Amino acid sequence: MSVRRVMGTEVEYGISVQGQPLANPMVASSQVVNAYASATLKARRARWDFEEESPLRDARGFDMSRQVADPSQLTDEDLGLANVILTNGARLYVDHAHPEYSTPEVTTPLDVVRFDKAGEQVMLDAARLALQLPSNPAIVLYKNNTDNKGASYGAHENYLMRRSTPFADIVRHLTPFFVSRQVFTGAGRVGLGQDGRQHGFQISQRADFFEVEVGLETTLKRPIINTRDEPHADPEKYRRLHVIIGDANLSEISTYLKVGTTALVLSMIEDRFISRDLTVDGPVAALRAVSHDPGLSQTLTLTDGRTITGIQLQLEYLDLAKKYVEDRFGSDADPQTVDVLARWESVLDRLERDPMLCASELDWVAKFKLLQQYRERDGLDWDDAKLHLIDLQYADIRPEKGLYHRLVRAGRIERLLDDDVVEAAMHDPPVDTRAYFRGRCLEKYPAQVAAASWDSVIFDLPGRESLQRIPTIDPLRGTKAHVGALLDASQTAEELFQRLTH
Amino acid sequence: MAQEQKQPKRSSEEVEEVEAAPETDVAERKESLDNDVDDILDEIDDVLESNAEDFVKSFIQKGGE
């Protein structure tokens, strides 16, 4: 493989209710999700199919009255259910105390960007719709990862991998990559330490929240390599690598490079192409050290005795990846693989000369540059509240208030996609994964889809006693090529079901 | 004839312009960069939340994931 792989992201958004710092974030998150669901869903709301957790029968009878009710009237138990599947195949739901959006499964880095950005627009619409609820809460959402007071929330990536790849190989080769990739994936942060008590700027939002090298946890003792193993696909053939170390990126290029380079490294691991041992001594401490040095001169010690910078460590992976792509594909490499390699090289080269040369591409550099300009003009120290405010407001997803958006509008941050493309991705699913089948079913037969999940769509068909579950265990089936004509030809869900099962 | 007299004059003006260009350019570019910086900071000043300290203090999240 190359940069192409079944993958996706899931982002928890920071949430606040204007003028009510003590507002219950679970209630506010439910208001956001429910407002979007009520305004956009055509008929019944398909439930998420927690196949293993609840009996199928429970999937029936989630009635309409609940979704139009103000969530503050619902009990805590019901609040946990705010959870919808969108016609683009994505999932919008409440996770703990944050609204969360999971992209549909896609196969290219640019599609990750497209559906990740569509998620921002869904969240923006959702917050605006929530304002129309009876209690009209003014909810503002932030695509960031910490409140700088000790709390962190995630922006996870998922990559489908071959089950046959030994997990030890993944740990060995991916850990040094994760320690150093933040030099271009970081979103930037004002404050050092989990509670931000020390003053200064660092590259990553998340680095200070990682405490161990490998583990299952995501909320305590966060590991650099997460071992959650829930493939949502044939477990004999696949594992899903759940990556929790990344920052939530606003910059399209940061997201593109984050996912594209990681996918390439995973391909090299699967094909056992990495012959060098790039193991870093004390990766948890190294992760923080790299993050805490926006000058990018901090060195790491490898177990082979070399001391190199984070950029130099990335250059090792880049060198391997270029050889790998040349070796496997030569001039037949697909355009996105070629583009990811070229951008990766260009960004590392410029970061090494002067990080500021990447201010129009990478989140942390764009933020750092802005902060430095304020420090210079107003003579501010890193403990100044204004700098902390700029850090937070960079991630405000409202185009009129968010500083990322202001920089884009002023032509200071480059984009990869047009607004129209992102807007369409809020509604239309990707065509080359099972998300196509899921999304089209929800769009075309909303009244008959009782529930759905990554690996199933469940129909409630008129005249049938039991619910009918269509498994979608293979992420690369249910594509437009497989079922597009079938969906086009089926006027009703019953017709579709007949055609699928006969 | 009048044209012939003008011709060299014009070209010498051009030469002078070309020679003068780099210096002015650098100065202008520096000035325009400074203006750019000021412009963007002014623009951002306009949208920044008004009480930075209160705002930052009240941004309290629960952990997630």
Image (spheres, coloured by chain):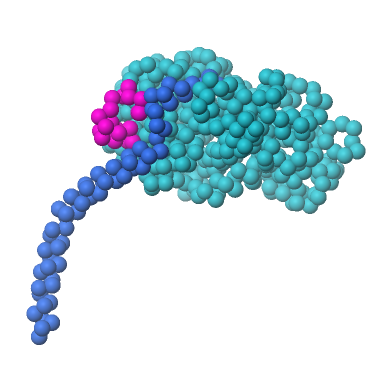
User: What residue is drawn where x is 23% and y is 50%?
Assistant: B29
Q: Colour of chain A?
A: cyan
Between B58 and B29, the residue placed more toward the observer is B58
Q: Position of residue A278 (x, y in %)?
A: 40, 24
Q: Is residue A474 left or right of residue A461?
A: left
- Quarter of the image that includes the N terminus of chain B: bottom left
The answer to whether residue A255 shows anywhere in this view is: no
A385 magenta-colored: yes
Q: Quadrant of residue B24?
A: bottom left
Q: Position of residue A101 (x, y in %)?
A: 59, 33
Q: Position of residue A275 (x, y in %)?
A: 44, 28
Magenta segment = A369-387
For the stretch drawn in magenta, what is the main secondary structure?
A: helix
- Quarter of the image that includes the C terminus of chain B: top right
User: What residue is drawn where x is 69% and y is 48%?
Assistant: A481
User: What residue is drawn where x is 61% and y is 23%?
Assistant: A26
Query: Vertical placement of A110 versus A102: above or below?
Result: below
Q: Position of residue A95 (x, y in %)?
A: 61, 24
The chain letter corresponding to blue is B
Q: Quadrant of residue A148?
A: top left
The answer to whether residue A81 shows anywhere in this view is: yes
Between A399 and A112, the residue placed more toward the observer is A399
Q: Quadrant of residue A164?
A: top right
